Image (cartoon, rainbow, N blue to C red):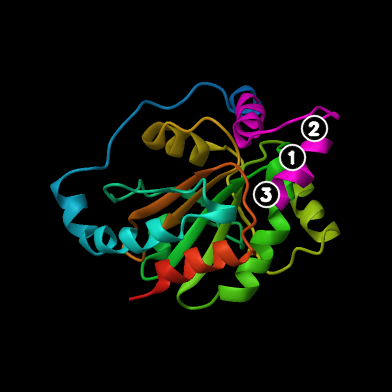
């Protein structure tokens, strides 16, 4: 993938040949930065499955689109409600994932200490520019726990202006996702339908502005 080719040389000049090495590298940083995980819990059940019945039919279309530059996307086998993740909105006030009900969202967790996260941010910005609107939004949540102005400055320096700034300076959102999805690395991206049900998951970076990613998101937006 073009994106991964760009990432590997930057990692201290080492020859990296797989997405798993990137995920492991940022996973180690995430665990050191965020500490022990929260207790595992499940949101699956009869009520969740009923709410996610529409998502269950949509994932079949997504499965055919998880290829090329987004081939590593894991389409949900049994869509279920995610926890109501809590973080801060662009105004700095608390908000939650449920505030986006009625809209398909791509939740992405990123941090300035995670090189692959930074590498994919321009593509996420371009994705928001291409498809963002009443029906879709890229919700990129920064989880830096120190120097709160650093992420904003980095975005400004890179001219990333289309993404609204969401943040969780306690990084609890990472722990909440890690608890239910058992993910270890960063970045993490979750594609979520208008009812709050998980459609797909990706651990690691992607070329989100590429044709394959656009086709995947468009398939999620179809009614």
Tell me the residue that label 1 is attached to: 115
Q: Is residue 137 above or below residue 85?
A: below
Residue with the most extreme left position: 46
Q: Is residue 209 above or below residue 32?
A: below
Q: Earlier in the sequence, mark 2 or mark 3?
A: 3
Percent of width and height locating residue 212 = 56, 63
Q: Is residue 98 above or below residue 223?
A: above
Task: Tell me if residue 21 is in the magenta stretch.
Answer: yes
Percent of width and height locating residue 220 = 41, 66
Residues 144 and 42: in front is 42
The residue located at (51%, 21%) in the rendering is 36
- Front label number (1 vs 3): 3
User: Mark 1 Cα within 10 Å, few/some/many (few <14, many 20+)?
Assistant: many
Q: Answer yes or no: do the residues labelled 1 and 3 have beta carbons within 8 Å?
A: no
Residues in magenta?
Answer: 1-28
The answer to whether 148 appears left or right of 33 in the picture is right
Tell me the residue that label 3 is attached to: 1
The answer to whether 10 appears left or right of 142 in the picture is right
Q: Answer yes or no: do the residues labelled 2 and 1 have beta carbons within 8 Å?
A: yes
Q: Is residue 168 above or below residue 16?
A: below
Tell me the residue that label 2 is attached to: 11
């Amino acid at each position: 993938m073009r994106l991964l080719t760009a990432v590997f040389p930057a990692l201290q000049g080492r020859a990296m040949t797989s997405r798993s090495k990137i995920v492991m590298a940022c996973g180690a940083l995430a665990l050191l930065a965020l500490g022990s995980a929260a207790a595992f819990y499940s949101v699956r059940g009869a009520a969740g499955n009923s709410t996610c019945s529409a998502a269950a039919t949509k994932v079949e279309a997504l499965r055919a689109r998880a290829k090329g530059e987004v081939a590593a996307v894991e389409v949900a086998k049994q869509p279920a409600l995610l926890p109501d993740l809590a973080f801060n909105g662009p105004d700095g006030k608390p908000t939650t994932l449920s505030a986006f009900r009625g809209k398909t969202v791509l939740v992405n967790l990123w941090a300035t200490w995670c090189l692959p996260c930074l590498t994919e941010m321009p593509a996420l910005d371009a994705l928001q520019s291409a498809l963002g609107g009443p029906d879709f939004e890229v919700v990129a949540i920064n989880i830096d726990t120190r120097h709160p102005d650093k992420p904003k400055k980095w975005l400004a320096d890179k001219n990333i202006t289309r993404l609204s700034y969401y943040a969780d300076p306690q990084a609890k959102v990472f722990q909440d996702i890690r608890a239910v999805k058992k993910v270890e690395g960063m970045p993490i991206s979750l594609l979520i339908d208008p009812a709050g049900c998980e459609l797909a998951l990706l651990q690691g970076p992607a070329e989100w502005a590429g044709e394959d990613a656009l086709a995947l998101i468009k398939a999620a937006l179809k009614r």
